[in-house]
Amino acid sequence: MNDDPQGSVDHGGNFRRGILRPVAAVGRWLDQVDPGTHRRIKGLRLVTAYGIAAALGTLQDIAHSVPGSVSLGYLAGSFALWASVSEGKTTRAESSRDLVLLSFAAALGAVLFVVFSRPLQIASRAGPELILVTGAFLVGYLKRFGVLGAGLGSQIYIGELLAYGARLTAADLRAIGIAALIAALASIVPRVLSGPAERPISIPALAAGPAPCSGRCSPEFFMGLQAAIGALVIVVLNDLIGLVESSWAITACTYVVAGSATGTIQRVRRRIIGTLIGVPLGLACLPVAVHAPLLIWAAAAFAMVVYAMALPERYDIACAAFAFTLIVTLAASGVHSIPLLAARAWETLLGGSIGLVAAMFVFPLRSSGTGE
């Protein structure tokens, strides 16, 4: 028997410290994911903008003049969601201006796809995908014009991607214009209401490019080339062997390219880790998607809030949240093919790997930053 009370106290203190240590570690991890209330407000704003745009797009008075081949609510909601992600100004006036520009940049991307997809489709089966190559280039190149330029490049690509996925045609041009107007309104309203409680954040995928290098073309030009060449390789692979959903691979390739080869390696690793976590979680929720779609949409909304909170510092968690959202929303919309949904993981791996190779061997950038 230990009769030393001091020893007993020390033992209890060691026990408490042993318990508190992992609790403190979890607390530090949560601080990285959710460092401030403004991040939660940003996430809620994304979800609100999407919800308002999707609701307005389904109103009979608005949707009756739009052809039935395109979901106006989905198109407007996607424009508004990603415009809200890309925007990062301090004042309401600046934010509102940028949200309008970003919404119409997405519409511009969709229009570019509509205009050029038909001639390219006649030339090649994979022709329409070549338009995504131009968007991939702009995602990198327009970073030379700051955060707004980076957001505009991203929105043009997203517009092309949405038009490619929905197979939009010239008959849908009116819908694209209406969707842009709805998206601008739907994204401005929650930003005005959030006010000074929300502070701008630096988004890795949309951050301005590295410092210029003397005697060479701008680094952003090389970043655009790296993304475009990687995307072109994926288009060729799809034409030769056929990929389940090649646009997922092109998107992964486009957004992993950073301001240096080291930064690209980090982004590829984090994107792959996040996707390999988010996709299985989404697949595990498939039975719920069939029987309780409302619950799945609520889970997707929560995941997008996590996406906004984690994106600046924890790109891996943000990618996991988005991969989960994509899988469960596809399932809630009626897509239940396990091979198709699981392809999100391995095609992200393919696209990220090709983007990494392009960043390392196509005019590699050796800037001092991480590129994050």
Image (cartoon, grey):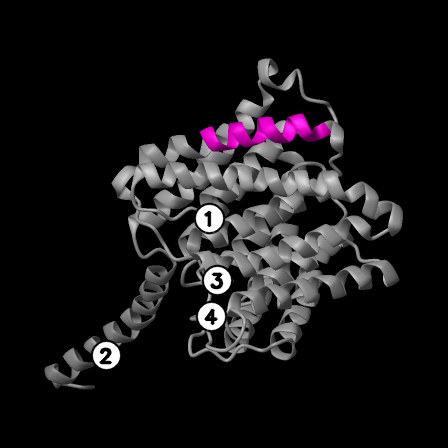
Question: Mark 4 packing: few (<14 Cα in 10 Å), some, or many (20+)?
Answer: many
* Disc on the earlier residue, 2 or 3: 2
Q: Is residue 175 magenta?
A: yes
Question: Mark 1 packing: few (<14 Cα in 10 Å), some, or many (20+)?
Answer: many
* Residue 315 tag number: 3
State which quarter of the image contains the C terminus: bottom left
- The kind of secondary structure element at disc 2 is helix
Question: Which residue is disc 2 drawn over?
Answer: 14
* Disc on the earlier residue, 1 or 4: 1
The residue closer to the viewer here, 21 or 100, is 100
Residues at circles 2 and 3 in contact by the CB criterion of under 8 Å: no
Residues at circles 2 and 4 in contact by the CB criterion of under 8 Å: no
Main SS type for the magenta part?
A: helix
- Say which amino acid is labelled 3: Tyr
Residues at circles 3 and 4 in contact by the CB criterion of under 8 Å: no
Question: Which residue is disc 1 drawn over?
Answer: 86
Q: CA distance from mark 2 to mark 3?
A: 36 Å
Compared with 310, 25 (above or below) is below
Q: Which residues are magenta?
A: 172-185
Question: Which residue is disc 4 drawn over?
Answer: 371
- Say which amino acid is labelled 2: Asn
Q: Nearer the viewer, mark 1 or mark 3?
A: 1
* Disc on the earlier residue, 3 or 4: 3
Instruction: Specify whether residue 302 is in view.
Output: yes
State which quarter of the image contains the N terminus: bottom left
